[in-house]
Image: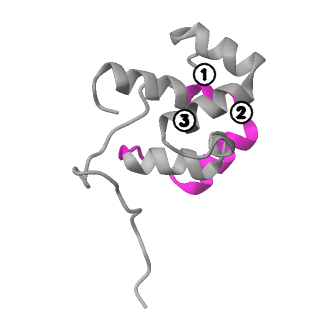
Amino acid sequence: MNPVVTQPSYGAGGSRVSDWQTGAFDCCDNIGICLCGACFPLCLSCQIASDMDECCLCGASVAMRTLYRTRYGIPGSICSDFLMLMCCPLCTLCQLKRDIEKRKEMNAF
């Protein structure tokens, strides 16, 4: 039995490697998203899920972050996704939404 040593990639590039457009604590990069995340995290979660054509209840999940990260070739692991969401859920949620918005601006979403 051969162990899996790399995560699958999605999309046409397959081997694209990228990184997050902003850090998890870069709230000043988009104050509107951070205010929405701090005051209405469920609303922000539903926006993220809608952007990714997923169920509204999935936006703030480890699975959603992992799907997004693997789709865009962002390094990390399911374990790091879980830890980020458990330790800093609002910052992590805002980071994901900021990344989506920046990729939309670059026509890369």
Query: CA–CA distance between discs 2 and 1?
Result: 9 Å
Quick one: 55 or 24, which is closer to the camera? 55
Q: Amino acid at mark 3?
A: Ser
**Where in the figure is residue 105, as x and y percent of width and height?**
33, 19
For disc 1, the marked residue is 25
Residue lying at 52% horizontally and 54% vertically, measured from the top left: 77
Which residue is under mark 3? 50
- For the residues labelled 2 and 1, say whether their Cβ atoms are less than 8 Å apart: yes
Q: Residue furthest right?
A: 39
Of 61 and 55, the residue lying toward us: 55
Residue at horizontal 60 percent and vertical 47 percent from the top: 81
Q: Is residue 75 visible?
A: yes
Helix, strand, or loop for circle 1? loop
Among the 4 quarters of the image, the one containing residue 31: top right
Is 87 colored magenta in this rendering? yes
Overall secondary structure of the magenta stretch? helix
| 102 up-or-down from 74: above or below | above
| Magenta-colored span | 72-95
